[in-house]
Image: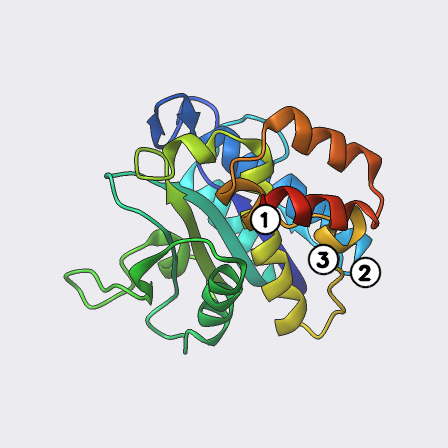
Amino acid sequence: MKYLIHDAGHGGKDSGATANGNIEKEYTLEAVLYVLNRLKNLGLNSDCTRTTDIALTNTDRTNKVKEYKHCISHHFNAGGGSGVETIHSIYSDGKFENLIIEEFKNAGFPIRQKPVYSKKDLRGKDYYYMHRDTGSCKTTIVEYDFVDGLQSEKIKDKLYREGMYECVISAICKFHNVKYVPLAEEIGMDYKALYENELSKSDAQKILNEKLLDKLEQITKIINE
């Protein structure tokens, strides 16, 4: 059995949640490709259900996922709430999902009041088909945040979204005993501090492009002004 696959939720005619210029299907594909590439650089190869903006039937998606031991299904939420949440199967212990939430907490991102849960349908089976119809694959659904919630404007910024993806990458590495090298360490910046202190996008991009660790001191100075 293959090891790890990432599912980019929605796609094609199915746009997923949309609000304020945020389109879920675009962000989920972005998340999967970003995480896939970062994990490869860190020494952990994985696969994905789609690499382009195509529609997949539930069966197409689950048949591919069944071939793997672990799956992370990437999503963005809607409904006006706030914060990340993770959903596991009713047959799972939720340890990995809690690890993901801890990484988001440590990075300072908002989380839901009940950020880890499972859900049954009326028959007592898993409510979500990605849990119910994926065989022995252990599937984790990650809902990064609400496209129409309090972070709606922040979510529009790719750097903010990548900060969230890094939390998932860190959790995957810890769970699978792979050494995690923070992207922030490579480019000398802190995602949370960057956005909480409203550093302009142009200034942030300039710092990112230079990719020098000594820029950390400059950023810290800006943050503390």
Cα distance between the residues tagged 3 and 1: 22 Å
Q: Quadrant of residue 208?
A: top right
Residue in the picture at 41% in, 74% down: 92
Residue 88 position (above or below residue 41): below
Q: Is residue 24 visible?
A: no
Q: Amino acid at mark 3?
A: Pro
Q: Is residue 52 visible?
A: yes
The residue that label 3 is drawn on is 182
User: Which x, y percent locates residue 31?
Assistant: 58, 41
Q: Nearer the viewer, mark 2 or mark 3?
A: 3
The residue that label 1 is drawn on is 224
The residue that label 2 is drawn on is 43
User: Which x, y percent locates residue 47?
Assistant: 67, 49
Q: Amino acid at mark 2?
A: Gly
Quadrant location, the N terminus? bottom right
Judging from the image, what secondary structure is the residue with disc 1 in?
helix
Q: Nearer the viewer, mark 2 or mark 1?
A: 1
- State how many labels appear: 3
